[in-house]
Structure formats: C-alpha cells, structure tokens
Image (spheres, grey):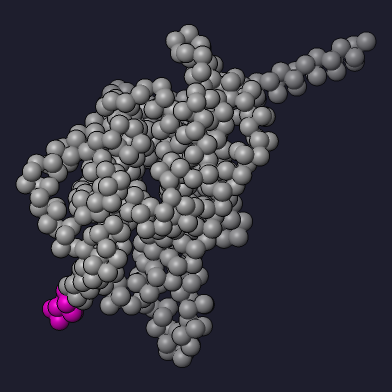
Amino acid sequence: MSTQSLSASRQTSTINALYRQFLDSSIALKVAAGAIILSVWEAVVRTFGPAYVTTPTGVVRAFPKVIVDPDFLSKAVATMEAVIVGLAIAIALGTIVGLLMGRIKEIRYALSHYVNSLFTMPMIAVLPLLSLWFGHTSATRLVFVVLVAFLSIVVNVTDGARGISEEYLEVARAFRVGKIRTMFDIVLPMLVPHLIAGVRLAAGRALTAAVIADFFLAIPGLGYYILFNSRNFHLNEAFVAVVVLIVAGVGFDRLINWITTSFMPWLRRD
Amino acid sequence: MSRRARWIRNCIVILSLAVGATAWEIGGRYVGEAFMAPLSDTISRLWELLQSGVLLRALVDSLSLFAVGFVLAILCGFPLGLLLARVRPLRVSLESYVTMLYATPMVALIPFILSLMGFGFTPKVLVVFLFAVFPVLYNTIEGARSVKPELIEVASSFRSSEWELWRDVMIPFTLPYVATGIRQAIARGLVGMVAAEFFLSPSGLGQLIIVGSYNFDTAAMLAAVLVVVVLGVTLMEAGHYLESRLAVWRRSAQ
C-alpha cells in the first residue's frame, strides 16, 4: 500500500512538474496571449459593433465553408501564382542585372539612378500607368509583381557583387582561372547571402503588390475576394482571405529561413 | 576616386539620363498621349499644375496624411517596443505576433477599414499607421534585445533607477535599430499613403494619378508620379541620413 501511494504521489508530482513547466514555457504564454487578444476582440465587437463586423468566432465559423469554396480557391491560386511566378522571373532577371551592375562600373553608373529612385519610390504610383498599358488583366498584375520584386533583388545583388573582395579575384586571375569558372566558383557563392536578403525583401513586397493589383484591377484574386465580400458585408468570409495572406506572408519568411539553415548553415543569422 | 574616374562617371550618368529622356520623349510621341505622354508634355503639365496651385495642395494633403500616420506609428511603436523588451513575459508572449504582423501584407485590411470607418481623414491615417508601425515595433524589439545583459547588470548594481536605466542604457543602445525601423517605416508608409488615397476617399497625389488614368490624361498622371518619385527619394535620403548618423553613434558607443 505504501509503495502504491508513493508511486501515486510521485506521479502527481511529475504531473505538477509538467504543469509548472507548461506555465513557465513560452508556448503557454504565447497561447494565453493569443487567447486574450482574440477574446478582447470578440467582446469589443459584440458589445459595440454591428452584427456583420468580423469576430474570431465568426471567422472560425466561416473558415470551413470558404476554404473548400472553388471560387475562393481559384482566386487564391491566381494571386499566389502571380507572386511565385513573378518572384521566379524577378530572381532570374534581378540576379543578372545586379551582377552586371555590381561588376561593371560603367553599367552601374548608367543604371543606378534609375534603379535606386524606382526602388525608393512607392511603386503603387505607377500601377495606373501599367493598367493603361496592359489593361485590367492578370498580365498587369504579373508585370507589377515582377517590377516590385525585381528592384529589391537588383539592389541587394548589386551590393553583394560590389562587395566581393578583390583578393579572391586576384588569386583567380593569378591562377589563370577562366571567367566562367570564376563566376561559378567565386562570384555566385559569395552573392548568395545578398540574394537571400533580396528574396526575403522581395517576397513580402511581391505579396503586397499582388493584393494591391487585385484591388486596383478588380481581377480574380484574393484581394478582389476581400474587396467583393467586404462590400457585401460578408466581413467574416473576407477575413478568411486575410488569414490565408498572413499564412502566406509568414510561410514565405519561414521557407527562406528553412532553406538558409538547412542548405547554408554557415549563413545562419542569430 | 581620381579626377579622371569621376569625370568619366559624370559623363556616363549624364549620358544615361539623356538617353532615358530621349527614349521617353520619342516613345511617348510614338505610342500617343493615351498610353504615355512624352516628357515635354509631362513637364509642361507639371508646370501648369504647379502654377495653378493644384499640385501644391495635393502635395500638402498627401504629406499631412503621411506625417500624421508616420508620427503616430513612431509614438506607438517605439515605447511599446521598449516595454516589450524590458518586461520579459510580455515579450515572450507577444513577440511572435509582432513578427507575424510584420510579415503580413497590411494592404489586405483596407477594405475592412473602408466598410467599418468609411471615408474621411481618420481611416486613411489608420492605413498609413498600420503600414508603418510594425517595422518600428519589430526593429525596436530587435534593438533592445541586442543590449548586452552585462550593461543592464552594471547599471542595476550601481543602483540606477528604472528611469535612469532607460535613459542611459536602453534608449541609446536601441536607437540605431529604431533608425532602421524608421527607414523601413518611411518606405512602407509611402505605399500606405498612396494606397489609402487610391482605395479610400481619393485625395492628394493619389487622386491626381487616379483621375489622370481615368481620363487617359497621362501627362497629368506622369507629372504626379514624378512628384511621388521626388518625395520618395527625398524622404528615404532623410531616413538614410538618420540611420548613418545613429550608426556612427553605435560604433562609438561600443
């Protein structure tokens, strides 16, 4: 009997310890904070807001319906496709132009004014011009996303290509290494951290750009889904699209982190 | 850079600007006013808008929208960031939400702001604020985290009060990071400014651009875009200046 009670008390003490650990752990704090934020939101809207205003429970109720709705899915796919295809094109073009600008100073002098001023201006201001050129079509959205992402990558790759230390290149020249091998063995590997920084910046901006284009062009996409549903006071349904965008935004960031830590552990930034 | 190299650089810059201007002029004449007004028409329209006072009013509208949202973002983001950095349970519980919102395309919230708050100045300020606040908040937390624990320990073993600790250790060491946040906030806030002027009640430079595109009046549109470019470059230069000034401080402080 004594052994039994002993093991029982040991068990409760381990449970207690686990419980205390849970209270101390950051996950518990995070979950609690999230729960508090959501319940304050819910309470405030229920007390003061009209019935159509977005509430967490409303979004949760709308979620299963919206997420299997083929109309929603096709729009989500359209926007994400524009972001991913746009990013891919921008990475290819941006790396080439950035390399040229970084390594050949005549090209840098000629282009840097254009690149820098376009990079610092809010690109959204030229969207109406693009819509005149390419119409209210998904092509305009793609061009806009490519443009926004391209500039972020060019600026970063140019910085990287300029920063390659002359010593390495001198050694390569001394050993009569060919231009192509120098490019693949020295220049490109040293460019990777800058390219990753550029892609990280470009991914966030591209997502924003795609949603702005959806709004402005009123073409099928997540932005348009949000606009249409919020105009009809289906704010909970519209917010499901925002949740998808948050997941996409955080997801891109995590993906880039994961690629960096698992394939290029020497670049990890802590 | 030698004198000769600088001379070559200036020549190339002038040449490339001349090529760009010529291409704009010839391209504009070739495709027609409805697609892209030539440079000469854009410049003369810019002069007209400037003389009639339309441009100045638009600029003042846009800038005041930007300024109010931006200043509010700093006034909220910086103290909140410091608070989160100092109070550990708060930081642990809220940091990942801040990171999440930092990566969220805030532009997606504009339709909600439109249907809940309607038209007017306040909802537009809210848009600029939402675009600008998270870079400030995020970078302040990063900066305050980078303050060495030894410094805080020394300060507290010399019995410095909480206020002195903030004034002498936390704030000076966090400022360089805040400057980076402010620079990001300028860039995002400008996007928020134009987005608010496009999608909420049209006003300022955004209205000039949008009305130009509805009327196929590309000369007026491009004139306004040029002003936006100048505004963006000027504000970002100011941001860079602030950042480099505070970065010097950071180096000398360590």
- Bounds of the magenta segment: B2-11
User: For the point 30% across and 66% down, which residue is it?
Assistant: B31
What secondary structure prevails in the magenta region?
helix
In front here: A124 or A128?
A128
B6 part of magenta stretch:
yes
x and y percent of residue A227 in the render?
A: 47, 34
| Outermost residue toward the top in this view | A47
Q: Residue A108 vs residue B1: left or right?
A: right
A179 in relation to A186, above or below = below
Q: Quadrant of residue B102?
A: top left
- Would residue B60 be visible to someone looking at this image? yes
A129 part of magenta stretch:
no
Quarter of the picture containing the N terminus of chain B is bottom left
| Outermost residue toward the right in this view | A1
Q: Quadrant of residue B67?
A: top left
User: For the point 27% across and 47% down, which residue is it?
Assistant: B215
A186 in relation to A146, above or below = below
Q: How many marks?
A: 0
A98 in relation to A69, above or below = below
